[in-house]
Amino acid sequence: MKEAQKPDTASYRTFNEFFVRPLRDEVRPIDTDPNVLVYACRWRYQPVG
């Protein structure tokens, strides 16, 4: 919860709202380098095959 904009779980009105909670801006910065592919997921991309 330390990554969430609202770390207090009581501040979420619904269970769904809790699971789609926004993160603080500084938690996962987006690289602005045009040669970098930004992949929107928590895990690292690892090609298979």
Image (spheres, rainbow, N blue to C red):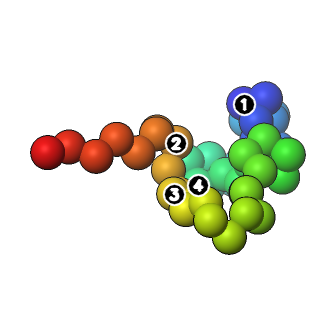
Q: Secondary structure at mark 2?
A: loop
Which residue carries the number 3 mark? 39
Mark 1 residue type: Met
Which residue carries the number 1 mark? 1
In the picture, the quarter occupied by the N terminus is top right
The nearer-to-camera label among 2 and 1 is 2
Spatial CA distance of label 2 from label 4 is 14 Å
Front residue of 35 and 30: 35
As drawn, which residue projects farthest toward the left? 49
Spatial CA distance of label 1 from label 4 is 12 Å
Q: Residue at x 84, y 52 (%)?
A: 25
Q: Is residue 33 depicted above or below 18 in this figure?
A: below
Q: Is residue 9 depicted above or below 20 in this figure?
A: above
Front residue of 14 and 29: 29
Q: Are marks 2 and 3 in contact (CB under 8 Å)?
A: no
Which residue carries the number 2 mark? 42
